[in-house]
Amino acid sequence: MTYISAQPHVSNSWDDICYPVNPVWLADILPDYDIIATDRQQLVVGQPAGGRKMIFGIQSTDYDIIPNILIREVVDKLFREYDLQIKYTTTGEFSISIILPQELSIGGERLQRSMILTNSYNGKTPFSIQGQTLTTMLDNNIKPGSSMYRAVCQNGLMGWADSFVALPDYQQWLEERPQGKVRKGTPAVKKEPGVRKIHHSRLTPELFQQQLYELLAGQNQQQATLTATVYEHFQQRSVNRSDENLLKTLPIPVQLAKQAYERLRLEQRLLGADPSYWLMYNAVNHALFNARSSLTLNDRYKLDERVFHQLAASSFA
């Protein structure tokens, strides 16, 4: 089934996404019917401020809704000072960037440390921290990677290389990886003893908040990351004639590639800079997360990761 085309809205207020959401059972609203579809009995219903009630999806009885208010409470408990950038769709998907005061220099630009959390009420985008689902992090004994916020285009940039121990490991994986693969390397950080594995079917609000708190603790510490090293390499690697058609080879829809090209030229004029892999990656990221598309937010992040690895492979070649 074709997914509804949507364009992410941008907000800096929790209030735009922390509206009431709750399950409504089909049997309660259809008491005169026998519900045969036993795997889908729960409506996910939310009511944005000033709006009508919306049915975001029909889920199984094992599905537990993660209200955005639970995320907000943990973030407010952990961090006294942060800025907020939210990208959300009317179909019930959310990308939440927690922008921290710590800064990092990439070339002549100042980026800020951030955390990107995703969530959804329609089941299309799983809850994740820095691009990793809760299950993946706990099963593989890793803690969240990094992300960075770039004010020039309000981009949230994910730490796609952070799961590799060192740059040579990442470069070797780039050379050996099958085309299109985004499998991670050896985790650089082991799980803390206090972080316990839980399954989504047993997820309670209290357990979720406990897990989220433990996984996010320490994210405000300023540490060098492998992704930042790759970004610095991108910034120093100019786009020459042989690279001019690179945008056309990236794994993104044609229309998004055209928008990325326009964004690349715009940033060149704004910054008075020559084209580079850094500007190209940011242009693609901007197009992916600001354009109207039938892609879910989860799909957009997957494409962003593939683009990052493909540009990295080309830049190191």
Image: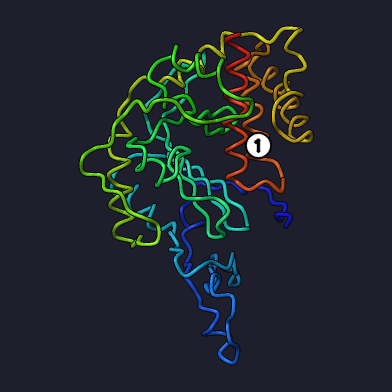
Where is residue 65, by image quadrant? bottom left
**In x, y percent, where is residue 222?**
32, 25
The residue drawn where x is 78% and y is 35% is 255
Q: Position of residue 107 (x, y in %)?
A: 51, 12
Query: Residue 52, percent across and down?
Result: 60, 72
Q: Residue furthest bottom?
A: 32
Of residues 261 and 273, the one drawn nearer to the viewer in this rendering = 261
Q: How many numbered callouts?
A: 1
Image quadrant occupied by the C terminus: top right
Q: Residue at x 62, y 31 (%)?
A: 285
Q: Is residue 192 visible?
A: yes
For the residue labelled by badge 1, is the local secondary structure a helix, a strand or a loop? helix
Residue in front for this viewpoint, 244 or 76: 244
Q: Looking at numbered disc 1 in the image, what kind of residue is underneath it? A: Leu
238 relative to 260, above or below: above
State the scheme by which the image is colored: rainbow
In the image, taking residue 252 as reference, residue 223 lies left or right, namely left
Taking the spot 60% from the left edge, 25% from the top edge, the residue there is 178
Q: Where is mark 1, residue-wise?
A: 288
In-image side of 88 versus 268 (left or right): left
Q: Which one is in front, 42 or 209?
A: 42
Residue 293 position within the rendered picture, expressed as x and y whole percent measured from the top left: 72, 45
Residue 47 sits above or below residue 317 on the image:
below
Badge 1, how many Cα within 10 Å: few under 14, some, many 20+? many
Q: Quadrant of the N terminus?
A: bottom right
Residue at left 55%, top 79%? 26
